[in-house]
Amino acid sequence: MKALLSVSDKSGIVEFARDLSNLGYEILSTGGTYKLLTQNGIKALEVSEFTKSPEMFDGRVKTLHPKIHGGILFKRDDQNHAKDAQIHGIDSIDLVCVNLYPFKATIQKTNDFDEIIENIDIGGPTMVRSAAKNFASVAIITDPSDYDIVIEKIRSNSLDLDFRRNLMIKAYEHTASYDSMIANYMNERFNGGFGDNKFIYGKKVFDTRYGENPHQSGAVYEFDNFLSHNFHTLKGEASFNNMTDLNSAVAIASSFGDAPAVVICKHANPCGFAIKENVLESYKEALKCDPVSAFGGVVAINGTLSKELALEMKKIFTEVIIAANVEDGVLEIYEDKKRTKIFTQNSDFLIRPDDKYNFKAIDGGFVFQNIDKISDDEVTNAKLVSQKQANQSEFNDIKIAWKIAALTKSNCVVYVKNAVMLAIGMGMTSRVDAARAAVAKANDMNLDLNGSTLASEAFFPFRDSIDIAAKVGVKNIIQPGGSIRDDEVIEAANEHGMSMYFTGIRHFWH
């Protein structure tokens, strides 16, 4: 029995090779893998010695040889194949362990195109595909986490067809994601990221209990190991809907750096937000916006979930909590709350991945775009278009309101006062309806909007929303501007003694 080992990720390969050797496998290897194995006392035969053909072209050609691919590919139960193998002196290779050149690591560390080209693996993917195609006779291992179970299967004589089929699927996933990464990179470099084909690939993190509804299946996939490294379950099981809600809540809470921001979301929409002296006070203030919607909602804490905060939050039912970190003893407080789920990022403050693009599914395909990012400069550089100017304290509310509006479903308006969101209207078919809905909700909660700031993620097409804001005492407004009736809207702001700022940047979210 022969095993061919040629890996870029060398974690665990010495132990794996030693176990294979002890189980009677003759080890073939290449380059750095061969050197590592022999340095650790493992008997191995270099591929160039096995094929009697030297490496060529600075290593570009070493495993592309009939004795390698013939040994992997010929059908063991086919008499013609067996005859060809005997005529040409081709021995069977029964196990192939390959993972590929670190293309991703290369493009992260250098922009040198020549170096990048040299880190495109050719022989590796070819061996992986060959072994995967002949999985009926060959075990193909591409994931170091499978080494132990493969050894266990060999020892127990249970390296059966079903197991090899699973290895085959992982192998094709490995080469598919690798080729996708290269194609996407080339399009990013030469076609602005929008080539004729776009490949979206992710690694499964976990299955969800079901999808948005019980009759749907669902799972969570990740890019670049972000969730594996930054999403930790302390209590409960995240559902499909939990993950989309968490995504919205963390997006808002993490937008304020190290500020003790707390966001309450329901159905991916914010229904509470505040930044106060600490996260406990922020939570208390955030809850005032809409405690009815907060029931059974999602809370994102840009800081520590302390025992004191946990006791306060426990007063109403919260389905999901995510915090940058969680104090010892919190889980004990929630032991009797079976339906509450708690997650953490194990960090000082909540973070998001630095994704460059996002996409949405549509029937028959998807739409793909550069990700929308909200910069502090949008408010800092906003143009004052009214006679009145906001003071420093009001400007802080303007910044908060603008970010919340930019990260909330359109059409939306947000009312903020003293760093607390008092009212919000979101996902409406008209902006004036959003303004009315927000004011109505604030009235229901007996919240005083006098002196507040109003933000809209897109321009006000008419002055009607401004007039509604004036009736409840709004003092400052921020919006992108760009309506053909901007003059009328600005005139309304001046009539009511409001400040108004134009950012020039729209943030639709559909």
Image (tube, grey):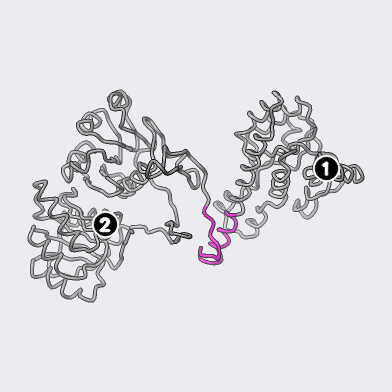
Q: Is residue 326 magenta?
A: no
Whole-percent x, y for residue 445 in the image: 11, 46
Which dot marks residue 471? none
Q: Nearer the viewer, residue 226 or 105?
A: 226
Residue 24 occupies quadrant: top right
Which dot, 1 or 2, sits closer to the camera? 1
Relative placement, left or right, of 225 versus 504 is right
Residue at 46%, 42% (x, y): give it.
219
Q: Secondary structure at mark 2?
A: loop
Q: Residues within 10 Å of mark 2 (few under 14, many from 20)?
A: some
Q: Amino acid at mark 1?
A: Asp
- Residue beneath disc 1: 78
Q: Nearer the viewer, residue 214 or 357?
A: 214
Is residue 282 left or right of 406 when viewed as pictured? Answer: left
Disc 1 from disc 2: Cα separation: 63 Å
Q: Give the residue number, with chain letter if any, for mark 2.
A: 427
Query: Which quadrant of the structure image shows residue 356?
Result: bottom left
- Counting the numbered discs, the total is 2
Specify the quadrant that holds the C terminus.
bottom left
Toward the viewer: 287 or 275? 287
